[in-house]
Image (cartoon, rainbow, N blue to C red):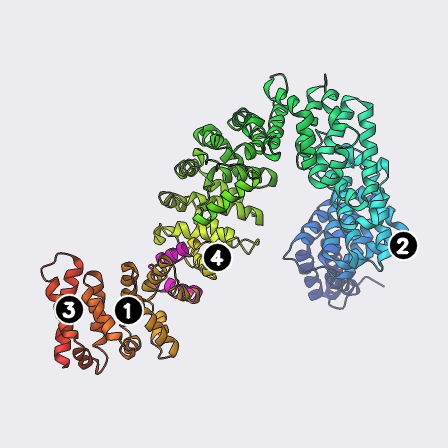
Amino acid sequence: MPPDTSPDADADARAAALATESLVLYKDNKQDDAARTLREALALSPRNPTVLNAFTTLRTSASIPAPSKLAHRFTLDGDVAAGTEAVALLSDPGAPPLDSEAAVGIVTLLLAHVGQLPDVTIGGQLLAATLAGAKAARERVAAEMAAGAAAAVVKRAETLGPAAVDAVVQVVLEKDVWTSVPRAEQGARTAFKVLLGRVGTPAARDYAVRSVARLLAGAAPAVAAAVDQAGLESLLALLRPGTPAETRSHATLAVAKFVEARGDVAQSMVGTFMAARLSADGDDDLALAFAVAAALFPLVPQTAAALFLSGGFVEGLVPMLQARPVEVEEAALEMVSAACIDAACREQVAAHCREFLQSVVKRGDSGEGGRTTAAVVLAKLQYGIAPAPGKTKADAGDIDTLSAVFKNLMATPDATSRESAVEGLAYTSLTGSVKDAITADASVLAGLISTLASSAGNPTLMFGALTVLQNLTAYLPVLSAEQQKMAQLKSYAEAKGAAAPAAAADPADSDPRVTQRCKALITAGVVPALSAACAKPTPAAVGIVSTILLALSSAQPHRGALAAAGAVKLLLTLHAAPANPAPPTTAHALARILVSVNPSHTFSSHLPISAAVRPLASLLTGAADAPSLLPAWEALLALTNLASVDGATRALVLRAAWPPAEELLLSENARLQRAACELLCNLALAPECAARYGDGSRAAAQRVHVLLALADAEARETRLAAGGALASMTGYAGVAEAVLRREGGVQRVLGMVREGGGMAVRGVVVVRNLCEIEGAGARLVGEGAVEVVAAAVQEAVGGSAVEARQVVEIGMETVKVLVGSY
């Protein structure tokens, strides 16, 4: 039969070729071109078998998630770019989640082809991303590990790199993906043994020690018993000086968690290690033993102290260090410094090592790091141990000599040297002469500020620098007469009946000297440094920084500079930090600054004034029972300042602070009452405030009664504030009617007029407002208002003061209205 050359046959052949081409394009990840080519084939021959087969293949493939298809191309076809794209898709937080079946398929595929992957690093990232996004995938790995393949899974993950190992460790720690607790614990033990065995392997060290630390932190009951002497020593070996900081940190955590979990057993094992290193007497052995002890003290101080105080160790330490290299001596000094956290250890160090430490500070042949550490230890001994009978703190050591070491280091451009000095200055800056010396030396002060600003990621350094600043800015507490008497009695009792003269305050701690130091710190840029250090503040940091800012703002001339440097924003950030509730000092420092600045210059659209209202209002609650009335008083002044800005701010202050502020109008403390009344005077401009006095309720009538009484208070400033509030609010009919209804209310207002000056202005305005109430004119005339106002006008005529002119102007108008209403 001759070949079919009809047009239909040509179209059929063309359609089949296009369909085949569409499959090739799809395989090459050119989906749009494949779809367009297939549509052309369907248009030519919709019933062609090749076309229909291509259509079915593409439709089925379209239902497979993109990460699955990319993972297959990466694993089976060696397409590295596909693997990279799959990792990006799975790591994208905005991408749709991968369904369980697809996730399990990717994990199974990867683990089955570990040895054939074109790029094991990308393979590890792909495994980690899949496990992180799908619980079903983690359950799949947990099931395989529970079936007896835990070691195999960990080893395959190791082949794929650190990301895969981290992901598998996370599976081990996630209890919900295991079918039973015993299986989870067995899987954790098996994985732990494999990884602990890798700690000593240089290529695996970093991920292995990180994983061991995580497992000991999260599953210690299951894995701690698997640590043998060799495994522990492999971890302890990473505590030696020179180990990268991150690796050393993980090893320290692992050892600490092991000691916590195994108690006496762990202490015995560490003791065996220490005894072996000390008896070996080699320089490297001693340096490692000292480094291990130094690392243990901050984390497990009781265990470390027991080892430090055992077997005459401290007594033999100084002889042991004779003729040793500088590195060994410095490691020993770091250990002794860490040991000072414990009181018994400090006593032993003071008894057996003090002369050696003093010699290290004085001589010039030791390393700078050792000299600094020795000075830090002496400072700790100085302030950590009571002086012997007959001696004073100053007799116990030359603190100025020690501080000179720290100051010289702080003045250097080397950041590491400055960090070494901070701990020592945290102790020596308790002495007045050292405080003045620090702020008087511009290079030392600059080094301290720079160190603080760069300390956000180093909590130990940050708290050291903050402690120094707290010492520099601390004012002596103001003691009442009763508190002074109690202090004398305490001093007498401590002297066991002997005559004990009160210790004279250090002149360097006098208020003028502290204020001078605060000024130097502000000028040096302490506020931006505090802001940089508190990027992610902890509760402890919030407390210390708030105390520092409270001290810096004590002197009124400093407050504008503090606000300009960003102190208001910093305090609001601290108050809103997750460390809530913030300490009262945060709001108190904020109040102190806002008393003395122009709110319009301090706040903006980026720093709204509304953010400051609630922190300030918090200081008013329970103020009557607070140890000091000062925070509430300064909060009232600050709120008064804010309430002068606009109606929206006044309305917010009313909502946030009204109940406690109203309560303080009745305070027995005259200054607190005056401040509350001045706040009310500014709030009276708000309709919301007038409504509280003029809604006709019994509560409103009582408020008017209190306000009229305050207009007759003993303190002139309180009378002026109450009179101003009455002048503002009687412009509202409800309040004016309440004054008229109050027995003796009109006479109290006329008493304001008779007083003259500013009170006369306020009184005349109130009388004028009362005239607007129907029928009130006759009553006012009957109670002598015309005569009283006229007399005030006559007295004010010819006066040059603004108040006198106001009395004349408003008074004459008021007299006319009164006479006309009669």
Residue 546 seen anywhere in this rendered image of the structure: yes
Helix, strand or loop status at disc 4:
loop
Residue 118 seen anywhere in this rendered image of the structure: no
Choose top left, top right, bottom left or bottom right for residue 33: bottom right
Label ID, residue 811: 3
Front-lying residue, 738 or 57: 738
Q: Which residue is drawn at 34% across and 70% down?
A: 706
Q: Earlier in the sequence, mark 2 or mark 1?
A: 2
> Dot 1 surroundings within 10 Å: few (below 14), some, or many (20 or more)?
many
Label ID, residue 726: 1
> Dot 3 surroundings within 10 Å: few (below 14), some, or many (20 or more)?
many
Choose top left, top right, bottom left or bottom right for residue 613: bottom left
For marks 2 and 3, give the CA distance: 99 Å
Whether residue 767 is situated above or below residue 228 in the rendered picture = below
| Front position among marks 2 and 4 | 4
Q: Which of marks 3 and 1 is nearer the N terminus?
A: 1
Q: Position of residue 128 (x, y in %)?
A: 74, 49
For marks 1 and 4, give the CA distance: 30 Å
Q: In this view, does 376 lie to the left or right of 263?
A: left
> Dot 4 surroundings within 10 Å: few (below 14), some, or many (20 or more)?
few
Label 2: which residue? 147
Q: Which residue lies furthest to the bottom in this view?
A: 775
Label 4: which residue? 626
The three-letter amino acid code for the residue at tag 2 is Ala
Q: Which of marks 2 and 3 is nearer the N terminus?
A: 2
Quadrant (top left/top right/bottom left/bottom right) for the N terminus: bottom right
The three-letter amino acid code for the residue at tag 1 is Leu
